[in-house]
Image: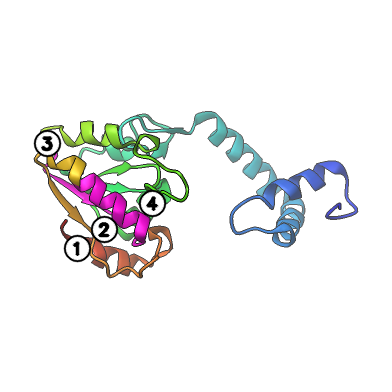
Amino acid sequence: MPHTSAGPQIEQLITMLSRLPGLGPRSARRAVLHLIRKKEGLLIPLGRAMNEAAEHIRSCDTCGNIDVKNPCAICQAPGRDQTSLCVVEQVGDLWALERAGAHRGRYFVLGGVLSAIDGVRPEDLFIDRLLTLAETPQITEVILALSANVDGASTSHFLADSLAKTGVKVTTIARGVPVGGELDYLDDGTLAAALVSRKAI
Ligand SMILES: [Zn+2]
């Protein structure tokens, strides 16, 4: 069923926007109307920014962050602590920790967590890449900052076992975070406190 009495291009725009997380058909319709009303100030620059992003953004070969540079700006930043590596599930978690200003070291994006139910196996994540990186002599600590749910916890234990042979110190963020909580949804203070009170795993 069409969303509006508008033409197919506008219908397609609404359909595509309604697939974004947090947007249903109703908010997609409102967003499209808003974009059309603000054609010069919003629709055209947004279209340009999306084109630009689609063309230049890529995943960092070192840490998995996304940026227009590879290695990314964080991996290349000279002022960052090169001894500490914080492992997160997704790029959104990395961004959340950066917003909180909670971690001054490097990051590694694992690509998810192990899950028997969802059929996610170790080879589906960037575990080999993490182990190689952890063997870099500069790195002395790996901080596991995964979600506080069953899959996050079992992945942390799997990683701690795998990292044991590298001799690096492995810590996990403290569970000031709610059980079942996903990092991306936490407020900055909770995240920062959880990172500060990390403990050996
Ligand atoms: Zn990077």
| Relative to 19, residue 191 above or below | below
User: Which amino acid type is marked by label 2?
Assistant: Ala
8 above or below 186? Answer: above
Marks 3/1: CA–CA distance: 21 Å
In percent of width and height, residue 177 lies at 32, 68
Q: Quadrant of residue 146?
A: bottom left
N-term-proximal mark, 3 vs 2 = 2
Mark 3, residue position: 138
Closest to the observer, 190 or 116: 116
Instruction: Tell whether label 2 touches label 1 (CB within 8 Å).
Output: yes
Going by the image, does 186 lie left or right of 199? right
Q: Pointer 2: what residue?
A: 102
Q: Which circle's residue, 1 or 4, is located before the other in the chain?
A: 4
**Residue 87 on image: x %, y %:** 28, 47
- For the magenta stretch, what is the residue range? 138-160
- Foreground label between 1 and 2: 1
Residue visible at 29% across and 57% down in the picture:
101
**For residue 17: magenta?**
no
Q: Which residue is mark 4?
A: 95
